[in-house]
Amino acid sequence: MEQRGKADIIGPATQGRTGKRAVNVSTRQRGSSKVLNYQSKKNAAPSARRRVVVLVSLVGVMTLTSALLMAIAPVPLPPQATSSLLAIDTPQSFDEVFESPSVPIEARRWNYIYIHHSAGTSGSAQSLLGNDSMLADHFVIGNGDGAADGEVQIGRRWHQQLAPGSVAGAESIVPSCISICLVGDFNQGRPTPTQQRQLVQLVTALQGRLHIAGDRVSFFTQAASTAGVGSYFPASDFRKQIMP
């Protein structure tokens, strides 16, 4: 009852002085609201600008990050792509052989090593490409004519851990075989001393890392065949230098 009475008293007073005050107060409140609204709009403008600046900065950072990732990402290898280990006078590390593949090396993937010559006096990984524009071998070791003497060229088949391709004169090669080609015709002469040293180091590095026994390192001495190593290949000396 008391609350209702108070409401009745306030109601009629709006027509008198009290009512004017109420209206005046209400007007000032409205004015304050307009001021507040205006201030809010003024404050909102810098806030919106800050959001735009932050958004633009974020886009810029993301663009720069994407560019950096693309720059450091490995470039897909074309079929003929190779990398090389140059021969030096001192024993060198063949760690790059195991770091270069673009897919993980599985030790159980490889069980044999096969060696043959190119049956030509000169050559390189590029000149020995097959009809499919791919090197049949995993590795090529140069003789100084077409590739540096003792240069170990690493082919795409090793980079991508693919089975060896077809070699002229060989009916087939076991898919789990690592194929190495020595540039030269060893029916006419011996490999260079640097070639021999690099071959031993490469083979023993592969044996040690992939657990391939010496009796699984294969080559053939048949004459007039690219699939063999020729009659002048120092087979006995080579066998003594690799792992048993």
Image (cartoon, rainbow, N blue to C red):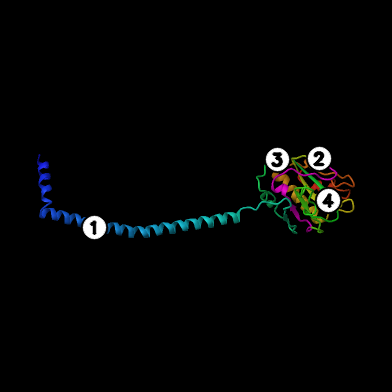
Q: Nearer the viewer, mark 1 or mark 2?
A: 1
Quadrant (top left, top right, bottom left, bottom right) of the N terminus: top left
| Badge 4: residue crowd in 10 Å (few <14, some 14–19, many ≥20) | many
User: Residue beneath label 2, please?
Assistant: 172
Tag 1: amino acid: Ser
Q: Earlier in the sequence, mark 3 or mark 4?
A: 3
Q: Residue at x 12, y 41 (%)?
A: 4
Q: Earlier in the sequence, mark 4 or mark 1?
A: 1
Q: Nearer the viewer, mark 1 or mark 3?
A: 1
Q: Nearer the viewer, mark 4 or mark 1?
A: 1
User: Residue beneath label 4, please?
Assistant: 118
Quarter of the view holding residue 45 = bottom left
User: Residue beneath label 3, please?
Assistant: 109
Q: Position of residue 193 (x, y in %)?
A: 82, 56
Q: Earlier in the sequence, mark 1 or mark 3?
A: 1
| Badge 1: residue crowd in 10 Å (few <14, some 14–19, many ≥20) | few
Dot label at residue 32 = 1
* Cα separation between marks 1 and 3: 81 Å
Magenta range is: 147-170
SS assignment at label 3: helix
Q: Earlier in the sequence, mark 1 or mark 2?
A: 1
SS assignment at label 1: helix
Q: Nearer the viewer, mark 3 or mark 2?
A: 2
* Cα separation between marks 3 and 4: 25 Å
Q: Position of residue 21 (x, y in %)?
A: 14, 55
* Cα separation between marks 3 and 2: 18 Å
Tag 3: amino acid: Arg
